[in-house]
Amino acid sequence: MQQYLGLLRDVLASGERKTDRTGVGTVSVFGRQARFDLSAGFPLVTTKRIHWPSVVHELLWFLRGETNVRSLRDAGVSIWDEWVLPDREAGPPSDSRPLVWVPRRLLPPSPLPALDFPLTPGTGGKSVDGRLRGVWAAMMSGCYDPGDFRYPLHGARGTFVAREWHDPARFATDAKLLPNWGHKLASWNEYGLDTSYFGSNAFSPETAVWLHRTEAAYCTALHEPFRAAVPGRNTETFLTLGHGESALGVSRCTLRRLLNGEDPSGLEGCGGWKVKAVPPRPGEVLRMAFSKGELGPVYGKQWRRWSAPDGREIDQIAEVIRQLRTQPDSRRIMLSAWNVADLPEMALAPCHALAQFAVSGGRLHCQLYQRSADSFLGVPFNTASYSLLTMMLAQVCDLKPGDFIHSFGDLHIYANHMDQVREQLSREPLPLPTVRLNPEITDIDAFTADDIELVDYVHHPAIKAPVAV
């Protein structure tokens, strides 16, 4: 990793002091490059410890198209926490929130609970735990007591309660961690326990949310999602005709006529409108997005679901793989995260903005352009991440890993990282590790953390430094 250490020395020796977005200040150079032969060892910095699980889980998170930090936190990765958007829970559906496709969360059935029905809510009175005991009793009765008025809506349709929630104490603990708990506390009667948000068949910690009764009606209504391009407004997607009616100020009948192909110029107030049905996606449901833990349309969204002007969503990773397999000589094998239209909605504009892939002699090469590069904290991480991505793409395309070329725009060291950089430069680099991928994996979406093994990583101790946000 002498190339990386050389970059640090270059910034210290040649850098210009600059102000920056974070207010910390930097020493910066512009326009540098490093090249790493992936067949000669994996380019993971050894002069300090790099947290390898964070590299792996973040890359898999990108590849899953996710933009919420919840699954990263579940994996013990906190590198994105500082950029989470303000902690706004979902609120009533009148709030202006985007629609997203949410994977259906279906669980295998749990055993029947050992309970005698009808249940009584308990003696907790008006305390929070007492009221939650009432919710628990209603949930259990609705799923397992044929004599309960809620049973036709739940138990008769196959909805059940996960084993861990057969215990009312465990339910009360978990219920306070579900999305919208703050709104439930503030408006108890307006929010109910819901599984339809995730199109699920179970009440469980992973599938239940506190949902406003109006939004619950949207979730359980007959869905007719559609996209409307209206002059003077951004193109918007709506969950139901009723949802569109209230937002656009036209009747459901009018929207139905537009969806059926009627000329908008013949409908009052609809001149220039373009309304198109959104086809369902297998295994997913369309929902209004929760913002808790959200980062906006960052890397995962752009890699896997880039929004086209005509409403399509483009899977760039799938297209990269298709071209590598069928058109390996193409000069258009690109992966971009720099979607100008989406930048205002992102918690952090993409730093590693554009990658290009090329095949030569059966080897896959990747060149990354990084517009802004935090030399001490970010660059070692980014180099490792895209080197790993190159290896994974090479494997699924029956190629060998080639070179990773890391090109930089603004390459900088933050003012509060100077001592850490000097300490790192005082250390002698150690031999590079290697990375082993499970050779059975031929689908990029099939990789898990267990399929990626870091071997012989010998390193100096970690050096801590603050993140500039």
Image (cartoon, grey):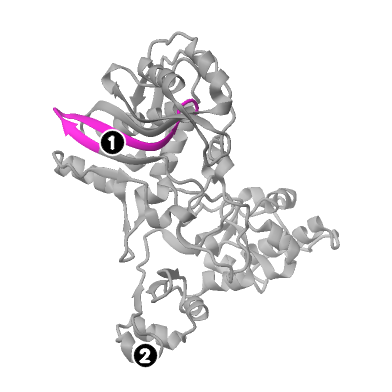
The x, y position of residue 184, in whole percent, is 70, 62
Quadrant assignment for the C terminus: top right
Residue type at mark 2?
Leu
Residue 428 to residue 25: above or below: above
> In the picture provided, is 403 more to the left or to the right than 8?
left
The structure residue drawn at horizontal position 49% and vertical position 25%, both measured from the top left corner, is 376
Asked which quadrant contains residue 462, the reply is top right
Q: Which residue is mark 1?
A: 393
Asked which quadrant contains residue 271, the reply is bottom left
Q: Looking at the image, which is closer to me, 64 or 465?
A: 465
Residue 315 to residue 439: above or below: below
Disc 2 secondary structure class: loop
Residue 364 is one of the magenta-drawn residues = yes
Q: How many marks?
A: 2
Q: Looking at the image, which is closer to me, 221 or 17?
A: 17
Lower sequence index among marks 1 and 2: 2
Residue 280 to residue 176: above or below: below
The structure residue drawn at horizontal position 33% and vertical position 65%, both measured from the top left corner, is 311
Q: Which mark is residue 443?
A: none
> In the picture provided, is 323 more to the left or to the right than 157?
left
Examine the rendering and report whether any part of residue 245 can be seen.
Answer: yes
Q: Looking at the image, which is closer to me, 210 or 295?
A: 295
Q: Which residue is mark 2?
A: 267
Asked which quadrant contains residue 407, the reply is top left
> In the picture provided, is 457 more to the left or to the right than 42?
right
The x, y position of residue 186, in whole percent, is 74, 63
The residue stretch that appears in magenta: 357-377
The x, y position of residue 170, in whole percent, is 71, 48
Residue type at mark 1?
Leu
Q: Mark 1 and mark 2: span between their CA atoms?
A: 50 Å
